[in-house]
Image (tube, rainbow, N blue to C red):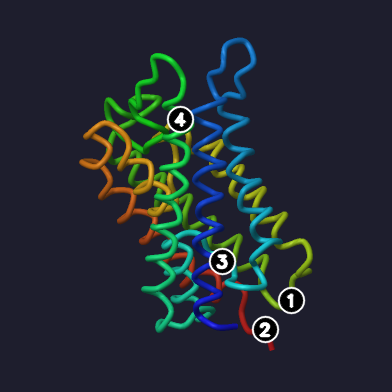
Amino acid sequence: MALGNKVAAEFVGTFWLVFGGCGSAVLAAAYPDLGIGFLGVALAFGLTVMTMAYAVGHISGCHLNPAVSVGLLVGKRFPASEMVPYIIAQVLGGIAGAAVLYFIASGQDGFEAGGFASNGFGEHSPGGYSMAAALAAEIVLTFMFLFIILGATDKRAPAALAPVAIGLGLTLIHLIGIPVDNLSVNPARSTAVALFAEPWALQQLWLFWVAPIIGGAIGGVVYPLVAGSND
C-alpha cells in the first residue's frame, strides 16, 4: 500500500475519532435529561476506533494515535520511515475533526468553548486529580491499550475480532480514566481539542504527549516479552 493512501486513511480515521469521541462529550454528554454521561462518551470513543479499524485497518493499520504508532514501532510492527508522516496525518486529521465539531457546537445560542473536551489535571480534572495521578493514569492506560492492540493483532489471534477487542478495550480504558483527566491516551486527540479550548488546555498539553508515548513504548516492549515467538 502506498504511503499516500496510508496517511490519508490515518487522517480520516483520526478525524472520526475526534469528531465522534469528543463530539459525544461536547454535544451529548450533558444534554438535559437525556445526556449520555461518562458511559456514553467511553462507548463513543470505543466505537470510533472499532468502526475505523474495519474501515481503514487494511489500509494503514488504523493507528489514529501517535502513541500507538510509537508502541507499534517499538514492538517491531511498524517501520520508522513512516512514523513522521503518520503522526502529521493523525494530528491534522484530529484538528480537522475538532474544527468541524467547534463549528457545529458554536451554532448553539450561548455557546462557550470552555474546556471543549480537553484533557487536564488539578483544577481542570473532572474529579480534581493531581498531575501525578494523571501522569500515572495515562502511562498505565496507554500501556494496556498497546498491550491489547498488539495481542489482538498478533498472527495467532483471530483477526476478524481484533477491532472488537480494541474498541472495547478503549471503552474500558475511558471508563477508568475519564474522571481523572478526561482521558487522552492519544496526543493527537488532546492536541486537536486543546487548540479550540481555553488557554489552560494548551498549557497542560505536554503531559498528554509525554505520558501516552511512554506508556505506548512500554507496551511495545512488554507484549513481545509476554507473548514469546509467533513462529
Q: Residues within 10 Å of mark 2 (few under 14, many from 20)?
A: few
Quadrant in which the C terminus is drawn = bottom right
Dot 2 and dot 1 residues touching (CB under 8 Å): yes
Reading the image, the residue beneath label 4 is 179
| Residue carrying label 3 | 9
Residue at 48 percent of width and 58 percent of height: 143
Which amino acid type is marked by label 4?
Pro
Mark 4 and mark 1 lie on one chain; the one further toward the N terminus is 1
Which comes sooner in the sequence, label 4 or label 3?
Answer: 3
The amino acid type of the residue labelled 1 equals Arg
Marks 4 and 3, Cα distance to the nearest angstrom?
A: 31 Å
* Quarter where residue 5 is shown: bottom right
Estimate the x, y position of residue 85 in percent, counting from the top left. 40, 73
- Residue 62, how many percent across, how many down? 58, 65
Q: Residue furthest bottom?
A: 231
**Secondary element type, mark 2:** loop
Dot 1, crowdedness within 10 Å: few (<14), some or many (≥20)? Answer: few
Label 4 sits on a secondary structure element that is helix
Residue 72 in the image: state x and y as whole percent.
50, 72
Query: Who comes first in sequence, dot 2 or dot 4?
Result: 4
Contact? badges 3 and 2 (CB < 8 Å): no
Labels 2 and 1: the sequence-earlier one? 1
Specify which label sits upstream in the sequence, 3 or 1. 3
Above or below: residue 212 compared with residue 106: below
The disc at residue 156 is 1
Instruction: Check residue 230 in the rendering and tell me which mark sits there, or answer none.
Output: 2
Q: CA distance from mark 2 to mark 4?
A: 38 Å
Residue type at mark 3 is Ala
Q: How far apart are labels 3 and 2 at the CA level?
A: 28 Å
Q: Nearer the viewer, residue 118 or 157?
A: 118
Identify the element where label 3 is drawn: helix
